[in-house]
Amino acid sequence: MTTKLTLSISEETVKRAKLISRKKGKSISKMVEEYLDSLSEKEEQKESVVDKIDKIMAPYRNKIKLPENMNYKELIAKWRYEDYMNEPAEAYKTKNKKQKK
């Protein structure tokens, strides 16, 4: 079943859409429909990634207890700082030389 939809689009965009429509041999309605379908497919894929992660993590949900007041951003910053501080000075100098080239 199809339904009519009214859009407000600039004249220039409509002209370009008509040119593309002729080249592709498709109606503007069909092109808009395909575009919107592609957007919804991308959204569904994003959701499916989250679902996959949920499935992987499900067995661990009630087994791992983390403090409620844990600040993950601070924790990550601390780990990065510790990694930076533990890195040998020679390695840092080598990285800088490579970046300057």
Image: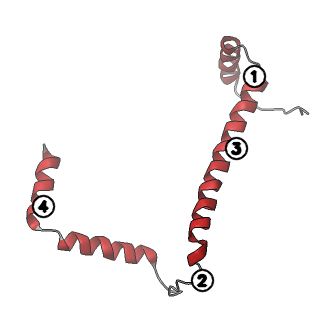
Q: Which-is-in-front pick, marks 4 and 2?
A: 2
Q: Earlier in the sequence, mark 1 or mark 3?
A: 1
Q: Where is residue 100 in the image (x, y as percent from the top left)?
A: 14, 46
- Disc on the earlier residue, 4 or 3: 3
- In the rendered structure, which disc, 4 or 2, sits on the residue that comes first in sequence? 2
**Numbered circle sitting on residue 40:** 3
Q: Tell me, what colour scheme is on the image?
A: secondary structure
13 versus 56 height, above or below: above
Q: Mark 1 points at which residue?
A: 28
Q: Distance between the residues labelled 4 and 1?
A: 58 Å
Q: Quadrant of residue 48?
A: bottom right
Q: Is residue 86 left or right of residue 21?
A: left
Q: What residue type is labelled 2?
A: Asn
Q: Which amino acid does label 4 sit on?
A: Ala
Q: Residue 76's quadrant in the figure?
A: bottom left
Name the element at disc 3.
helix
**Residue assigned mark 2:** 62
Residue 50: image location, x then y, percent: 60, 60
